[in-house]
């Protein structure tokens, strides 16, 4: 009989770590599908909840209602932001904690509860630059992409999270570093996208784009969007990018009005290390904006490094990642609407 | 001091297996980036090479040249397809093996060498429906997407593969099952894409689309493309899909001429189990085609299940997945061409 | 003083006629904007109305109601199709005319009234292959693109048309001729679009495309749509074509899934004479379909000539072409919906 | 016999003039296809040529060579711009005229000759805000969209224009008026496009869009492009607009990154009077730019009126509008390239 095949070893490296996998029969298989949805199990009872709400007094009554339930019924310690604490601590009827700096919040907060819209999840991302506790988002009327829970069912939903099992989507963030003369001068984490554009200049400097240190193209366009799957249904979609399911480990690279017909939106793996350089002799500077805010000029010679953060924003799903996502698409875009499909 | 957070356990299930991950400090991180590129190390010397070439006599001299080198210099056993064996065994000057059925080929072939174009890789995928040995693809003039090696450097390239380390892209295949009355009546594996369309009918039956058993939408369109990343630069791209890097673990779901403006191309995770049903009362039947061949009618009431195969097609990269891919894009679409970018 | 410029003559030819325009001061101006919307004034009172309705008995009561009003109140002669005449002449209560052949209908019918959906306008186009009387379209519930009038206001609307002034959109039709060995073997007029596609064949023959006798490109695609502005919001839009206002004198040329990234939808002037040839040595045949019907095979060597018909379908506008069109877009696509715009 | 149909009158109004057309047999036909290509015939010999070239000394030798030929062989008076006159009048060897102000240039210049690229045609459009003489554009190496003539054949081409018949494309310009408190404060004519965008602001004010005085939609997008057919292959194309043949009398309305999936590029008739209003209570101001230059802020409450100019830029075609245009598309986008079409 013919001899068997040579045994092999496969080595996977993702920039952080390398793993060796011995394959004795020489048959190569996938190691297991990638997925960013996990089930959360509390090994002991959680103790402290941070409640966030959007600025202004409108939602403070709802916040106090939620806090009272969590303290008196669930036995939790409840923490709120300093400005909220100043406004409501006296009248809340239960003890409310607050904090001086968000730096160590992640060490003591078991769960974050958001009352408001998608903007609040971006605020969570800003408060927790390192590890982020699970985030439970309630909508109070206006339905966003990331707020699957209805505040009317607050008590039941909280009970399910504390006592049942719940599914988390581990939402990738992108760590964006502005490089000047090779040194990082600013760093931002984004949950949706970072955009490099020409600002008010009629010209876009030619932007050199690198992946893992290799020049992949020089872009002439109004700008470039680097987006997470979470951001794929936001600005990237306006620019023609695909809808990317939140469990796909990927970074979207979507040009804005490219001057070349051959430049289509690209989907990179999550491990890709992207860099955009403004050439030293370029016609103009460029601008970067992070989750639609924090606008930052990129001077000639500057670079912007973009790569996945080790620390996801884990959001609690109402049902599961697929069902929640399509429900959001339906709400926002009439995705599944028959009436619409009749139209054309 | 405030107490520490509750420790948690995360459970990841991908349909095949579940893994538990204990997180004692409660800090959720990514487990390691997903990547479909691995490094291949031979634990012992490989012994048998299968050489494939496209049909017809044109490339037989190159095949014999390659075979002689592999036998005499590298000491390999060389295998060819039966028709090729019949044509050249007598004049090859070295012993050539062949096979009666491809069923057990994967147990004895250490490496596949292709001389020809992209179509030959599709042929590899057909020969090896289970595990596939690493595939080394040489172009002989016409440059395809999957043939990064130049036949002029055959000897050097072979030496590198046998003695050096080489990078493999584990290219996902989709297993497609035609269901009739709930029973699988046909099964195909595709490396590029499966398409469901209306065939010659002027009407498309409404197609019900499911992900993991949940109805996500009813499509009215000329058709639907379900594509691997490898296929993302083929038909899916013509229909408006994004370019997806070969290391992204994802399935593309790209509508052809959708009748709804809100239906954009979707990128699903690799673990997604997709199903397309032709309604029992639908206006007409539908057609499925697999890698552009094997056209198959889907009757009213039939379904088509699509999910990733456990068995990738591992192709040897000339440099690495990113460099090889952008070189292909440049060749095929002038992706990086400055002249083109000046145009607009 | 410097002398004046040389006087010039400009000659405009559109394939049908040439006009000379003397420009004595040498200053070139536009002769007047193109528009396909005109105001209709009856020089004497119209006398005969043809009422059409979709097949089946459902709308016959409405048809009889309309007929009685037109005969008794407006003093019109009313004509219906033969099958309708057979079904309702006895019970209508007023005299109804009918016809044996549609060939000379255009000589006696002053106005066509449609009760039903967009499909009925396509039927008008089939009945009147030459000149078409003004068409007044009533919707009875389901709102189409071409049915701006509400049947509830039938009497008032009819009065306005007979006694007031009304605006007509002159909707272009395309005359499509199938050429075999240089001879026209079939001819169709379309109001929406003609499509050339690959039918059930997995391959598309290369199609040579000509404008005014000059080869402009060889298309590799799933197919080609040649559409009127009326058809621009139908199939052409699914394939990525722009929305074209009904008063633009233009022919849309929209590829379906083109295999080249540089092939974008093209808008030609109304005078363009387009031709698609299936090469004599092409890999397969092609199929043409006309307004989504009348599927016709194009053999190797066949050609398809497409040019504007001299005879428009004049549809009565409820308000004016722009208002009616945007109202249709809003109904069909939520074009103006704020809720939708919030989504992204 | 049944009586004949009622005779009718059709009235066409385009905002400038109304025409009555009596239709005695009641049969409605098109009046003749719209076309923006005309044949130019000189009624008497032209006498004065204005030669333009791009700034800088590089092309002055070519300009002098052209001038000497026109004066000595063709017997023309030759005019150049003041700065060029100052630089070369002494060494030209023939008499060169110049001018103090461009205001009355159109009364004395029979023909404009451009030596350079597309930018020079934009300069012609700026010099001649009213009537524009025919423009003959020579490329000197770099091939643009509007420079079909090769300078190597200068003498032959000039002879053809003076003694033969030549085809002119009457290229539409858009007159753009900035309105503040209902008063026009600035006016620009553009040959390519006018763009309204959000400038450096991260927010776009909601823009109210009107056609002929009617609100058609409120746009949420990065911006809006209003383009001529000439500009359809420039910025509008980057934003997803169709390629519009230069003889189509139309205005393109192309959104940049619209926030609604239902907002597709629109093609309006040339007679459309468009207006964009920045709401008085809008979140931010907007910016308009005209042919990529002359950036102008639009304050809250400002409006921008856009409509076709009565005065086209007549450019001399090398062959005819269709052939010249497809040759440009091929040069700029490899439109017709077989190699490209093979790629996908």
Image (cartoon, coloured by chain):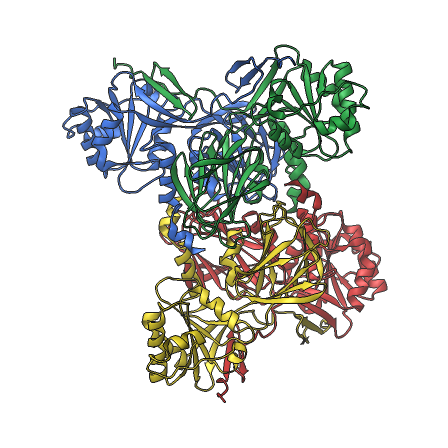
Chain colours: A red, B yellow, C green, D blue
Name the quadrant containing residue C166.
top right
Q: Where is residue A235 in the image (x, y as percent from the top left)?
A: 57, 49
- Front in this rendered view, residue C298 or D71: C298
| Left or right, A96 with reference to D255 | right
Q: Where is residue D303 in the image (x, y as percent from the top left)?
A: 55, 29
Which residue is located at x 56 percent, y 69 percent?
Answer: B34
Q: In this view, does A142 lie above or below B118?
A: above
Q: How many labels does the image show?
A: 0
Residue D318 visible in the snapshot: yes
Q: Is residue C227 above or below residue B223?
A: above
Which residue is located at x 79 percent, y 18 percent?
Answer: C94
Name the quadrant containing residue B22.
bottom right
Residue extending farthest to the bottom is A1
Q: Position of residue A231 (x, y in %)?
A: 60, 55
Residue extending farthest to the top is C44
Q: Position of residue A43 (x, y in %)?
A: 75, 75
Check the picture and name the quadrant holding the N terminus of chain C. Answer: top left
- Front in this rendered view, residue D306 or C167: C167
Q: In this view, does B69 lie above or below C275?
A: below
Residue D177 visible in the snapshot: no
Q: Is residue C17 above or below residue A278?
A: above
């Amino acid at each position: 009989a013919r001899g068997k095949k040579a045994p092999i070893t496969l080595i996977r490296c993702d920039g952080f770590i390398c793993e060796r996998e011995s394959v004795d029969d020489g048959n190569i298989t996938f190691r297991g599908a990638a997925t960013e949805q996990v089930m959360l199990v509390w090994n002991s009872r959680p103790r402290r909840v941070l409640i966030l709400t959007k600025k202004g007094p409108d939602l403070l009554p709802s916040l106090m209602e939620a806090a009272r339930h969590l303290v008196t019924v669930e036995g939790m310690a409840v923490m709120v932001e300093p400005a909220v604490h100043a406004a409501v601590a006296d009248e809340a009827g239960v003890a409310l904690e607050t904090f001086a700096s968000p730096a160590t919040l992640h060490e003591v907060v078991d769960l974050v509860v958001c009352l408001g819209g998608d903007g609040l999840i971006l605020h969570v991302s800003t408060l927790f630059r390192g590890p982020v506790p699970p985030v439970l988002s309630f909508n109070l009327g206006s339905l966003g992409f990331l707020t699957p829970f209805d505040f009317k069912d607050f008590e039941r939903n909280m009970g399910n999270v504390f006592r049942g099992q719940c599914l988390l989507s581990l939402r990738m963030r992108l760590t964006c570093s502005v490089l000047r003369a090779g040194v990082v001068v600013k760093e931002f984490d984004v949950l949706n996208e970072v955009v490099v554009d020409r600002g008010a200049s009629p010209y876009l400097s030619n932007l050199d784009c690198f992946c893992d240190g290799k020049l992949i193209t020089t872009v002439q366009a109004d700008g470039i969007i680097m987006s997470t799957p979470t951001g794929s249904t936001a600005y990237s979609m306006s620019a023609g990018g695909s809808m990317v399911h939140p469990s796909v480990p990927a970074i979207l690279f979507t040009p804005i009005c490219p001057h070349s017909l051959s430049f289509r939106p690209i989907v990179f793996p999550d491990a890709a290390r992207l860099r955009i350089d403004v050439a030293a002799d370029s016609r103009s500077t460029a601008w970067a904006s992070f989750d639609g805010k924090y606008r930052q000029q990129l001077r000639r010679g500057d670079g912007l490094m973009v790569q996945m953060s080790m620390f996801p924003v884990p959001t609690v799903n109402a049902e599961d990642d697929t069902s929640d996502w399509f429900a959001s698409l339906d709400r926002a875009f009439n995705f599944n609407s028959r009436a619409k499909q009749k139209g054309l």
